[in-house]
Amino acid sequence: MYLATIHDGDETTAVAVDERGGAARAAAVADLIPGAPGDAMAVIASVPSADFTAAVRAAPDSAFRPLDGLRFGAPYRHPRKIWGIGLNYVEHASDLTESVPEEPASFMKGDHTIIAPDEPIPLPAQSERVTAEAELGLVIGPLCQDVAEDRALDHVWGVCTVLDQTAEDILAKNPRFLTRSKNFPGFLSFGPAIVPVPHLLESVPNLAELEVSTLLNGRAERTNTVARMRYSPEFLVSFHSRVMPLFPGDLLSTGTPGAVHIRPGDTAGCVIPGVGELANPVVDGAPGRR
């Protein structure tokens, strides 16, 4: 079960996708929950994830339609904040000859970086080496400010797959260039599924059990479990809620088990069993590049 956004021409609709009977089918959220908005970010802001989960379960089969012909996009395009976390897996930090910092190495990205699943990642002219990084994304639900770690998941509406891109050669010049290296257009893809936390926790005992894989051309290049993060998802939510308020729809990307160097013609991917799959082709964003 998950929340997603489908496109029909210029129109977008928030849908609930359910897999009852082994076949995934979709229904407009507004058809399942009276008064619910048609926009996924507004659904997150106004419909608690537990209520969403209950409404989908209670809906009759006749409310849903097959996924055939539906085009899924980014769940939404304009979250108020996108937090990223660097060097959160010990193994990934060692790949970069870095040590895991004593506090989360966080950074922010603009919403102009967001692309939809299957939309091309354009490699910028300013970089000769771009990497893609699969990550577990946390989607904030209720307003989250000064929240204790043991209550952090109360403020997470759902989880999703993420691909976070980095202009690695720019970052290598100077660590203070992190913001620039992370903020080219197309440097963030997420979704298409946002899985409600109450539903997810029925199949896994906690988020630590989730396994995150970075794919290159369909092959898993790096895989690790959330349990091997230096800073858990719950800690990251609590920590950042003490820095600034987190609003409904804000996205917190929790770090990668490993990056892959991407080139035109490649396809980057993220797979998290129980959460979803995400893939984006790679194109040259600088025609005439030498």
Image (cartoon, rainbow, N blue to C red):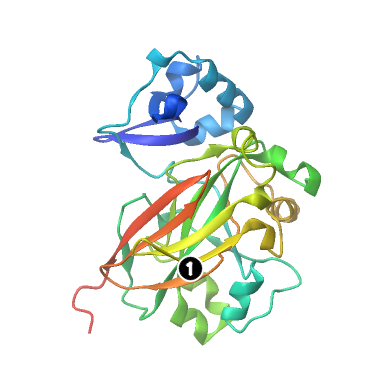
Q: Indicate the position of residue 173 as horizontal and vertical percent values.
A: 50, 86
Residue 224 at what x, y percent from top left? 58, 62
Q: Quadrant of residue 86?
A: bottom right
Q: Position of residue 150 (x, y in %)?
A: 80, 45
Q: Residue furthest front?
A: 22
User: Label 1 belongs to which residue?
Assistant: 182
Q: Residue at x 67, y 62 (%)?
A: 229
Point 71% across, 74% down: residue: 101
Please, is residue 259 above or below residue 116 in the view?
A: below
Residue 12 left/right relative to 93: left
When asked about the image quadrant of residue 282, the answer is bottom left
Q: Which residue is more in the foreground, 21 or 77?
A: 21
Quarter of the picture containing the C terminus is bottom left
> Is residue 33 depicted above or below 183 in this figure?
above
| 130 over 41 or under it: above or below | below
Q: How many marks?
A: 1
Kind of residue at badge 1: Lys
Q: Residue furthest left?
A: 288
Q: Point out residue 269 in the picture as x, y percentages from the top left corner.
A: 40, 59
Q: Is residue 201 among what the camera can see?
A: yes
Q: Which of 194/23 is in front?
A: 23
Mark 1 crowd level (few <14, some 14–19, many ≥20, 10 Å Cα)? many
Q: Please, what secondary structure does the residue beneath circle 1 have?
A: helix
